[in-house]
Image: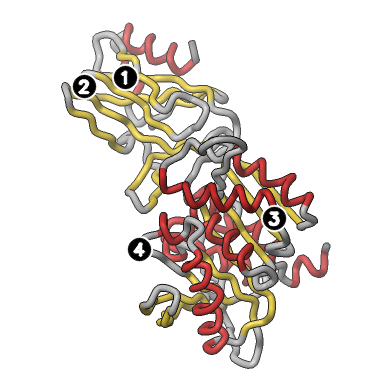
Amino acid sequence: MTVAVEQLRDAAAGEALESFLEGRESPLVSGTRATFFWRGEADEVRLRHWIFGLPSAATMERLPDSDVWFVTLEIPAESRVEYKIELVEGAHRRLICDPLNPNRASDPFGQNSVFYGLGYERPEWTLEHPETRPGTLEEVTVRSRAFGESRDVLVYLPARFRRHRTYPLLIAHDGRDYLRFSGLKTVLDNLIERHEIAPMVVALTTSSDRLVEYGADPRHARFLARDLMPALERNFPLSPLRGLMGASFGGVASLYTAWRYPRLFRRLLLQSGSFAFSDIGHHNRSPAFDPVAEFVNAFRAAPGKPAEKIFLSCGMYESLIYENRSMIPLLQEAGLEIRYREARDGHNWENWRDRLREALSWLFPGPLWMVYE
């Protein structure tokens, strides 16, 4: 039994529960053990988290003669865990954010509560700083022969952008989500201001059908290589250094495009790539992964040299950790320069945000690293 649970039980037994809980936030933390609690009436209460390897739902115990429900989890130091509370009332179930925890993270599906494990701190370079000169965003419309339609692409230009200079280009899949949920513009502004990365142009693409277009779709690769790239070259002063980045299916789209168009993109940033494959038989994921597995199987058989440098990252609490780890020896044997990082986090935008400094400064180093490395 944890210290927090003992305190809860003692407080309830001594009729001091209200005063004990007053002003306290969930979870109660004792070292690496976190006791999540919720107050209210329900038939059953569960903690729903996204830690692959543990049962996805942890049933909460009701403290006798009270409306307090609790469960304790062992969570390693430096973890960052997103979760929700599941309330079961008869045949009805609903998921809510933890009302006793003010920490939230957002994604395209809404919000989750967040638990910060012992030692985790949000990187200060992800926060806005008043002294940092901001870059700008402008929208360009690209006529796509690959898709037979026009597409709007948001383009980040660094502070002090000058037409007579040339800049590296990075194309970011799910770019608007990177802006909204990973604070990509703030990160770029800060790292460029500190000379940790080179001033660069970043094209922020999006797709209304990403599970198809990002899933090893030759039309999407052609759009990037034959439609978007020439359009960007006409509109902005670009150097020969070009890269692709993406998370989840966006990671697949990045690797697939570089594989189909070798030597066009020299840098890849692949975050929690959905690199499903099978050594024998069929893969064990949803039908959306069918073209992905077909591609990754072909890539594993003949990786070639899709880029010069590849940065990969994945959360230890993701179901994709095995697939991402398995890519490392394959890429190394192909003679590529690889850097790989894992974090005690899940498949989410703030995990990807926290890896951006190391990834971008390695792929596109600024003057700071040129001097001290």
Q: Which of pointers 2 and 4 lies earlier in the amino acid sequence?
A: 2
- Residue type at mark 1 is Trp
Marks 1/4 in contact by CB < 8 Å: the verdict is: no
Q: Residues within 10 Å of mark 2 (few under 14, many from 20)?
A: some
The residue to which callout 3 is attached is: 303
Q: Residues within 10 Å of mark 4 (few under 14, many from 20)?
A: few
Image quadrant assignment for residue 70: top left
- Residue type at mark 4 is Ser
The residue to which callout 4 is attached is: 208
Disc 2 element: loop
Q: Relative to 347, say whether 86 is above or below.
A: above
How many numbered badges does the structure rendering display? 4
Q: Which dot, 2 or 1, sits closer to the camera?
A: 2
Marks 2/1 in contact by CB < 8 Å: the verdict is: yes
Disc on res. 42:
2
| Residue at left offset 45%, top offset 20% | 72
The CA span between labels 4 and 3 is 29 Å
Q: Which of pointers 1 and 4 lies earlier in the amino acid sequence?
A: 1
- Residue type at mark 3 is Pro
Image quadrant assignment for residue 62: top left
Q: Which dot, 2 or 4, sits closer to the camera?
A: 4
Disc on res. 154:
none
Q: x%, y% of residue 244?
A: 59, 66
Q: Relative to 186, say whether 54 is above or below.
A: above
